[in-house]
Amino acid sequence: MTTWHEKAAALQADGRAFIGGERVWAKSEQQFENLSPIDGRKLGMVARCDGADVDIAVAVARTAFEDRRWAAKSPAQRKRVLIKFADLMQKYGQELALLETLDMGKPIKYSQTVDVGGAANCIRWYGEAIDKIYDEIAPTPASSLALITREPVGVVAAIVPWNYPMLMAAWKIAPALAAGNSVVLKPSEKSPLTALRLAEIALEAGVPPGVFNVLPGFGAEAGAALALHMDVDCIGFTGSTRVGKQIMQMAGQSNLKRAWTELGGKSANIVCADCPDLDAAVEAAIGSIFFNQGESCNAPSRLFVEASIKDRFIEKALAKVPAYAPGDPLDENTVMGAIVDATQLKTVMGYIESGHADGARLLAGGKQARMETGGYYVEPTLFDQVDSSMTIAREEIFGPVLSMLSFTDVQEAVRQANATHYGLHAAVWTADLSKAIQTSRALRAGTVHVNQYDGDDITVPFGGYKQSGNGRDKSLHAFDKYTELKTTWIQIG
């Protein structure tokens, strides 16, 4: 049986862009080197697309939309293609998982289950959904008939991050394609490989050439060109709040294209003394912050524990931390892999130093790990005695760093939880149903978990309040972003 290391050694990654059903280098012929965070190995050269390539891809996508090669297909026809797309993703699942792990450092076990499995399920779910959505007839006088119909918005640009490259791409392209749009996807320059492979797989599944295009490149070049393009009808962006604000500005100063953003988070996890299962709360708190190396926008990085149970909580938490020691991402037993690159490693270590400087008490971790590999690894890190004024309690770290705060009054915990620019996720653990409902209502977040964390699925919307963005990924609500509502008022007789 071939090992993952042997498969990685044999891998030949194609870094060319995908435009109009073909692999192409950037018009400028510029390229950039793609290095793996697991050990620094070179994965190959990638096309460095810019405004010239964006112009070509958008023109191709516009032609594909206007000639209706995809949009004119019935929902049932698009459904069949998207289901085949999902089936092929599963068929090529090991290849996709290997590309994901090598590109951004996550453990191969999760690349297979969460990333390939979740992305294929997303494509399949929207394919299954699209022929089950009905339009409306408005109540009118007998002399009229008023139809309210959904139509595809046109050319959709999607810009996705490096932490879940394939899954975030699926969250954008699945509802956009299902609705009949043409798409230009820009993956992060730190993780372009699975997006490029997805475009080939979509073509094999029957998505017509020109309908799904992928441009690797840098944000300031390809990303900005998409946001400023006068012939892009809609842009969906997942990434930092700082860049999300720029996307909104560019959308406004160009053609006022729809701009949908899913941005940062600093999610609060509140554990009350009457928590029904303290072991489950500890497992969720530790597992959710260290999952994906802490590189999750919805990671519960602020842990509020009621003072009377804090010591017990810490004891149980510290017993679990060693299981999350970073390991070889190509080992099936590894549960925490590599940080995506040297820049992010420096950022995470800077926040750890900030925690020290501000007076937080380091309970575990805090150091770089596996330095002999040439990769980028950080120990799972836990700080106690954190207060809300500290940088590590206010800013998104995007690394395996958990800040623990304590409280005696749950209303005060909610006040602190809401005292942030973000509002993506939150959680409360309590056996008191009234307290759970009151607290979940009071928390200003797009998703509130009660007595669990991260147990939701594709059927519910994902997005945030405040500076965590606008619009929602996942669920049927995602169609709102990629469709226009049209009213047709018909006079009868």
Image (cartoon, grey):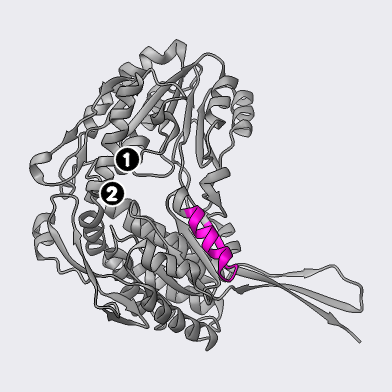
Q: Is residue 33 left or right of residue 168?
A: left
Q: Is residue 63 left or right of residue 299?
A: right
Q: Amino acid at mark 1?
A: Phe
Task: Say which of 129 and 425 sits in front.
Answer: 425
Furthest toward the bottom, the residue is: 67
Tell me, yes or no, whether the two marked residues, 2 and 1, touch with CB atoms within 8 Å: yes
Rendering quarter of residue 379: top left
Residue that badge 2 annotates:
110
- Point out the stretch of residues depicted in magenta: 244-260
Residue that badge 1 annotates:
291
Q: Nearer the viewer, mark 2 or mark 1?
A: 1
Q: Amino acid at mark 2?
A: Tyr
Furthest toward the top, the residue is: 308
Tell me where residue 22 appears, x and y as whole percent: 31, 82
Q: Residue at x 43, y 49 (%)?
A: 240
How many angstroms separate mark 2 from mark 1 (CA)?
9 Å
Instruction: Tell me the SS state at disc 2.
Output: helix
Using a 10 Å C-alpha cutoff, classify the residue at mark 2 as few (fewer than 14 neighbours), some (14 to 19) or many (20 or more): many
Please check the rendered image and state whether residue 249 is part of the magenta-colored stretch, yes or no. Answer: yes
Tell me where residue 321 appears, x and y as whole percent: 26, 27
Rendering quarter of residue 34: bottom left
Q: Residue at x 48, y 62 (%)?
A: 125
Instruction: Tell me the SS state at disc 1.
Output: helix
Q: Residue at x 50, y 32 (%)?
A: 427
